[in-house]
Image (tube, helix red, strand yellow):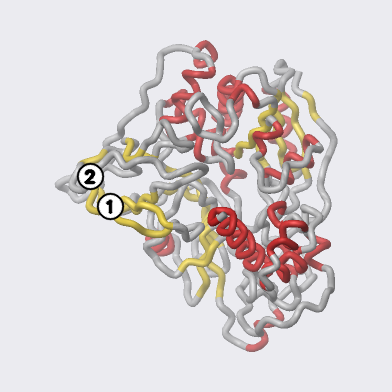
Amino acid sequence: MAIVGTLKTFKGGRYFPRLEGLPRGPIVEAPLPARVRIPLRQGFGEEPDLQVRVGQRVRTGEVIARSDEKISTPVLSPLTGTVVSIEEGVHPLDGEPTTIVLVEAETSPSGAYEDDWAPLEVPQGNFERWGPEELGRILYEAGVTALGKWGFPTVYRTAPTEPSAIKALLINAVEAEPYLRGDRALLYEEFEKFVTGIKILKSALGNVEVHVGIGYDRPHILAELEARMEYHDWLYLHPLLPKYPQGEDEVLIKTILNREVPAGRPAGELGVVVCDVQQVIAAYEAVVEARPLVDRVISLGGSAMARPANARVRLGTPVGDLLEAFGHRGPSRVVLGGPLRGNSVTDVETPVTREVRALVALEEPRSPSAALRWGFLPRTDAHVRLLPPLGRTKRATTALVGGTKPCIRCGDCVDVCPQNLFPFELAEASKQGDLDRAERMAIFACIECGLCSYVCPSKIDLLEDIRRGKRWIREERLEA
């Protein structure tokens, strides 16, 4: 029978109060965009080879880039339409160069967008009889293998580790970063898909243990999982405290398995692969419904979002389309991803990719008193250790009033670091160009959760300094 563990947590981290603009209610469908911008490098791995040309008609789910010999996952068209341009651009999340394909939607005589699907090739019958290789092929061709931080291993080169080396599958069903509520909504609305999706991913990996980490504040989901999986002795259920960043691979593995992921190395080296709720459900849709991964549920929220929601969004949809559809109020700062780990965006054509889990719009304060407000984002946050009054939500702004001050060695960043690092020392070594010292202090063990920047009373952008140090070290290694 399924085994239920005891309540677990980790050192450091932070709880966040209820915030104004949290996405609530059922999952809604975002409007189909008139055009999509599709970066060819999405998810884990390299950029696959282009398979289309300008002027070509593509169907929804049709492959536009694929390279079976590279560590990669096929990129699929999220719309039915015409390829109007292929250009070099920058990736919306890391700023590195990538090829971008622009597809304009096809419309019917009435003006409605066409949606002509190219379904996956899926065998008939029960998936439990297909074997890991066939399941791996379907997950690969559907684009599901790109959703995890280090990919999902299959017979194709979709991860740095072979499937035979994996001994444990961890499923992250706990969201703790502010405004991220997509997985929570999927668990409640698509629970049947989630249960079957667990079995599909387990079958794709073979004889592995499956561990599900779920917030203890969702007792009904935990009880239902225990009841539904009663006769599966390979399943372990772990109630977890919903403290940020519990869902990060390194923290989840340490909390559940009590094993340390080597700094900067993939979890597969420990024989572990981590998936989230979205990936589990996408596996079900690929295998059972022959549906390729062309959209995902993202959370749209923040104090400057008039109609916060969890929305199913086509990949490649421009940020500007979503802001317009869900009532963006300016002036604000728009963040692609969660407010702690995401990137500020100013270009409304920036697209949603497979990795994006949220779009957050935060108000820009207009008065000097705003410096006392509690907010988000490095260099602009006002760090206040106060919770909102009972029964009320708290408004998060970017608190732009007030500049960066010198480090006062308060140790707040050390207290919250889930990796037991000294963020202020790492940031200082990076700024001084002392990269040997930064490596000795395990800079690559930083998981970039952003808590150090958030809690810093001097508003120092510690995370950006650490990221810059990592980039410089990688560049030095490439030159060597």
- Is the residue marked by circle 2 packed among few (<14), some (14-19), or many (20+) residues within 10 Å? some
* Residue 428 position by quadrant: bottom right
Q: Residue 364, which numbered label?
A: none
Q: Residue 53, labelled with which disc?
A: 2
Element at badge 1? strand
- For the image shown, how many numbered marks are present on the structure? 2
What is the three-letter code of the residue carrying label 2?
Arg
Q: Residue at x 69, y 28 (%)?
A: 168
Q: Which residue is mark 1?
A: 86
> Could you tell me which quadrant the C terminus lies in?
bottom right
**Residue in view at x 66 percent, y 64 percent:** 466
Relative height, residue 131 to residue 395 (above, below): above
* Snapshot quadrant of residue 389: bottom right
Query: Which badge, 1 or 2, is on the more N-terminal residue?
Result: 2
Contact between marks 1 and 2 (CB within 8 A): the answer is: yes
Instruction: Say whether residue 11 is visible.
Output: yes
x and y percentages locating residue 120 in the rendered image: 37, 26
Image quarter (top left, top right, bottom left or bottom right) of the N terminus: top right
Residue sitting nearer the eye, 266 or 92: 266
Residue at image point 77% right, 41% down: 260
Residue 308 can be seen in this image: no
Horizontal and vertical percent position of residue 145: 50, 34
Residue type (three-letter) at the residue carrying disc 1 = Ile
